[in-house]
Amino acid sequence: MTFSIAGFNLKKLQTYVDWKLLLFLLLFLNVKLAVKIPAIVIIYLLQFNFKFGFSFKNSRLPLFYLLIIAIAFINLIINKGYNNSNYLVVFAIGIGFWLLCLLAVHQIKLSVETNSVQILHNTILVFFVINAIISLTTLAYIMIDAHAINPFRYQGQYQKYFLGTGDYIKGITFDISTTNAVINAFGVVYFLTRKMPLMVLICMAVLLLTASNFMNIALLVVLTGLFLFKTNRDQKSLIVICCMFLIIFLAKVSPQNNQYVHETFKNIISPPHPPFKNTVALNTADSSKDPEFVKRQFTRHYLDSLKALGINHKTGNQAVAIIPASLPKTGAGRIILVGADINTPPYQTPTDTPAEQRKLLAFINVHKSGLPLSGQDSFKMHLPGKVIGFKQTVSFLKTHRHQNELCMECWNEPTQRLMQRTHLY
């Protein structure tokens, strides 16, 4: 009875999603071309079909791909690009990209035609779940590395994360975080129309973690349109919750990102004046009344201000601190303490050459004649670094064949004796 139940569950799992389509999506959406091409090969081995079904009327696939390839050939002939070998390489690569797109569209269309609607929905659901797991796992790694629950406010390690935390949330594609943001924005709208609230909130959370301001604004516009024209009461509630997620993220999780957006729009609406205009304003007689001027002066003399605040005049057992009247204060009289300047070296990526690199540069400068690659002042790689490394390894093995054979003999002869002495044999 157990085996029959297990067999039933396995069979149900096999028919729950289109595993070929899921595997193709996971591989083909990867940013690396070295993964996309094998994805095409694998899906055509699993689902061999080249019946594209092109026609001028009711074409099965868009004619766009054929037309764009035809335009490229026409451009090649008109501009006589065939006389330039470099252009021919670029032309061939461009045609190859369009053919990859055509082959991918054909397989997706084939999966849509051969599977039921429910299986397709299940496949999409599993894809977004996997993407969310990878995104949240990346966030967990960042939290462990930064030793901070909220890395969006973490300014250590030369601001390794901080405002750029979202750049690390790349998702299943391992592309830039904006790609992950676009995918999850589509997921929010898709699962909203499918009335799946949990997945709507998961996709919205992953989208916010990428900290893509453009996608946040674009999705907000789309959700506003759906809220007004094409949603029921439950969907409107989900849209409100998504908007609350966005407000909480900007207000509590990453307030600096909120300030960044505010300053960006402020500069677009009212561009800042050139620095020389501000300099003239600071030299006026009334510049001391400008709160920004007072803050800059206080920041410039930060250490001196701390020292001035530490001057005590003893009256009995009490210490009284003299507080300069020029310090910036709130309307209630509370002194405004300026925080650390995040633009100073402890918070920024170092730009000077480390000591280890200085040693390497000195070594290269002394041994330029024996370093055919590193010894060149301006070196242009014509091959990928891995290919160069492989060729160098093969060359080393060929030129040191005698030493390699000697090492193997030294290993083979005393190995058994050595293992006996150490009681390992």
Image (cartoon, rainbow, N blue to C red):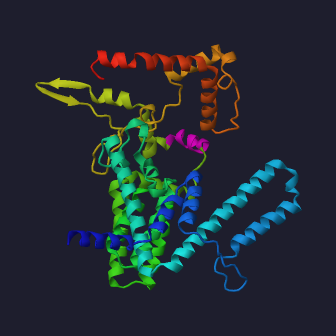
Residue 361 lies in the magenta stretch? no
175 to the left or right of 91 = left
Which range is magenta? 275-285
Q: Measuring 42% from the left and 46% from the top, which residue is drawn there? A: 291
Q: Is residue 309 above or below residue 225?
A: above
Which of the 4 image quarters holds residue 197? bottom left
Q: Main secondary structure of the magenta part?
A: helix
Q: Position of residue 4 (x, y in %)?
A: 25, 72
Quadrant of image for the C terminus: top left
Q: Is residue 287 above or below residue 67?
A: above
Q: Position of residue 47 (x, y in %)?
A: 55, 69
Relative depth, front residue between 94 and 60: 60
Q: Is residue 378 above or below residue 34?
A: above
Q: Measuring 22% from the left and 25% from the top, which residue is drawn there? A: 312
Residue 31 in view: yes
20 to the left or right of 241 = right
238 to the left or right of 46 = left
Q: Position of residue 346 (x, y in %)?
A: 42, 32
Quadrant of image for the N terminus: bottom left
Relative depth, front residue between 68 and 393: 393
Which of the 4 image quarters holds residue 336? top left
Relative depth, front residue between 240 and 46: 46
Q: Measuring 32% from the left and 70% from the top, which residue is drawn there? A: 198
Residue that lies at the very extreme toward the top in this rendered image: 366
Q: Position of residue 50 (x, y in %)?
A: 64, 72
